[in-house]
Image (cartoon, rainbow, N blue to C red):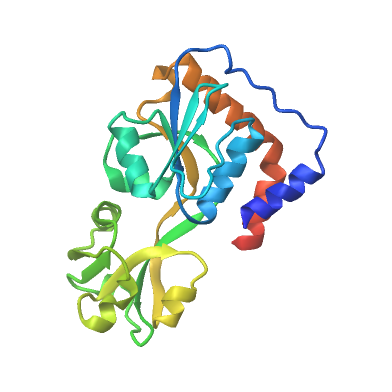
Amino acid sequence: MFVTAVKSWASTHKGVSIQMNLSNRIETIKVALPTKGSYSEDACRLMETAGFICRRKGRQLVVVDSERNVEFYYLKFSDIARFVGQGYLDIGVIGQDLICDSELPVYEVLLLGFEKVTWHYFCSKKNNRALFEYEAPNIATQHKNIVTKDMVRRGLKGTIIHMNGSVEIAIRLGIADLVADLLCSGETTDENGLKAIGDPIMTSSLVLAARNPREFLSTSVNTFIDQVGNVLNLWQPTIKAHILRRY
């Protein structure tokens, strides 16, 4: 996990001090962090290293850093994109793929550079056809908009079958000819008899996202972004080494 690499970095840089510049402002910033998995821990560690109090206790979903006027909300990824785009949150940690899928006014304001994933089409291992040989395939996915945009780009005709999860079983059930999903370790698709086919749909990393480009954000929000960016500049060798090990 990326956080292990970060802890190692922190142990060898004990003299590094991250200076905060947000304590004198009045505006309260609302920041969303992912609620589950390694993404959540990595994002929390990043914010902590930047000097913020954001670590939750138990099932706590809101953590208030009253000294710096920042509120951290723990949400599902899909809700982060929606609530940032609708203006309920100032900033959120989210994947580039979910920004693409949301079709809301959400802009990347800082590339975090870790937790990289790739989207692919998958077919049965028993099938030897190339992607372009499929005529009007049914494609199962959780994220319709990502796949729709890619189909337009490729000139691929077909029907998208939306599923809320377990898309890997769609071909075996006869629901779909292809599956469009993330490729992380590859274990889930491999164990369910699937293989990647064709060029990747897209590659996605975690980013800080906001409703507007940086030039239209408040001074306080931009200061928050800069503070996190300063930590990333210190972490870059660790992040790059982590990505190379995993991918």
Q: Work out whether residue 173 or residue 70 is closer to the camera in this orientation and state it.
A: 70
Q: Is residue 184 above or below residue 233?
A: below
Relative to 199, 54 lies left or right: right
Quadrant of the drawing holding the N terminus:
bottom right
Q: Residue at x 45, y 20 (%)?
A: 28
Outermost residue, bottom side: 126
Picture coordinates of residue 78, whole percent (x, y): 33, 48
Q: Quadrant of residue 244?
A: bottom right
The answer to which quarter of the image holds residue 43 is top right
The residue positioned 36% from the left and 64% from the top of the image is: 181
- Does the rendering let one see residue 113? no
Viewed as shown, does residue 49 lie left or right of 164?
A: right
Q: Position of residue 157 (x, y in %)?
A: 18, 63
Seen at 42% across and 45% down, the residue is: 96
The answer to whether 200 appears left or right of 236 in the picture is left
> Can the viewer see residue 20 in this picture?
yes
Q: Quadrant of the C terminus?
A: bottom right
Of the pair 103 and 73, the residue shown nearer to us: 73
How many discs mark residues in the rendered view? 0
At a point 60% along the width and 26% down the height, the residue shown is: 227
Left or right placement of residue 60 versus residue 52 in this view: left
User: As rendered, which of 204 and 12 lies closer to the eye?
Assistant: 12
Q: Is residue 73 above or below residue 199?
A: above
Image position, residue 146 (x, y; %): 30, 53
The location of residue 133, given as percent across then percent down, is 26, 75
